[in-house]
Amino acid sequence: MASYRATIEWALAEDAEAFTKGRYSRAHTVSFQQHVVPATASAHVVGKWAAPGAVDPEEMFVAALSNCHMLTFLHVARLKGFVITRYRDEAVGVMEKTPEGRMAVTRVTLRPAITYEGRTPTEAERDAMHHEAHEECFIANSVKTEVTVEEADRV
């Protein structure tokens, strides 16, 4: 078993009245063992109270799914004898209301563009590797969000 830690830290930069009226910065930090990331609430949710240049939880969620799929796909491809020289994904997550009326990131579409050296997999081999990567991806196994892959042209 492994455990993972993140420290989230926020402090009120305005006065108490600004806080009670919802007029406060959502800027905060997410600290990991070796680095700190500037973070914020999504501008789609809090408008001008979002911190420019910072990453929001929804973006981190989409990135985590994309990142996990890529790392797992690289492993699967290597075991199948393929050599990948570049992998670029322009993943998109959609936040919308669920049937229960709650807001959620309900769908994430991964759009990897992959360059191979040597033999390139057939469409069936590629689809099978994406399926296997999805089945083995720790993050995908941890969420109920629909994740699809639409491989782009090679980069």
Image (cartoon, helix red, strand yellow):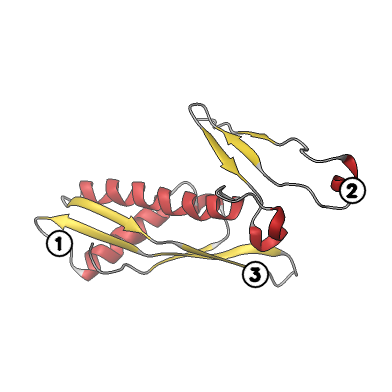
Question: Which residue is disc 1 drawn over?
Answer: 120
Label 3 residue SS:
strand
Q: Determine whether, in the image, residue 140 is placed left or right of residue 14.
A: left
| Residue at the spot 80% in from the left edge and 41% down from the top edge | 14
Of callouts 1 and 2, the N-terminal one: 2
Would you say residue 1 is visible in this rendering? Answer: no
**Image x and y of residue 118, in percent:** 9, 55
Q: Few, some or many C-alpha atoms within 10 Å of disc 2 (few <14, some 14-19, many ≥20)?
A: few
Q: CA distance from mark 2 to mark 3?
A: 27 Å
Q: Few, some or many C-alpha atoms within 10 Å of disc 3 (few <14, some 14-19, many ≥20)?
A: few
Q: Nearer the viewer, mark 2 or mark 3?
A: 2
Most distant residue in the front direction: 14
At label 2, which amino acid type do we have? Thr
Most distant residue in the bottom direction: 99
Most distant residue in the left direction: 118
Question: Which residue is disc 2 drawn over?
Answer: 20
Query: In the rendered image of this protein, does residue 34 appear above or below residue 120?
Result: above
Would you say residue 20 is visible in this rendering? Answer: yes
At label 1, which amino acid type do we have? Thr
Q: Determine whether, in the image, residue 20 is placed left or right of residue 9.
A: right
Of callouts 2 and 3, the N-terminal one: 2
At label 3, which amino acid type do we have? Glu
Pointer 1 with pointer 2, Cβ within 8 A: no
Question: Which residue is disc 3 drawn over?
Answer: 96
**Image x and y of residue 36, in percent:** 54, 33
Q: Nearer the viewer, mark 1 or mark 3?
A: 3
* Quadrant in the picture for the C terminus: bottom left
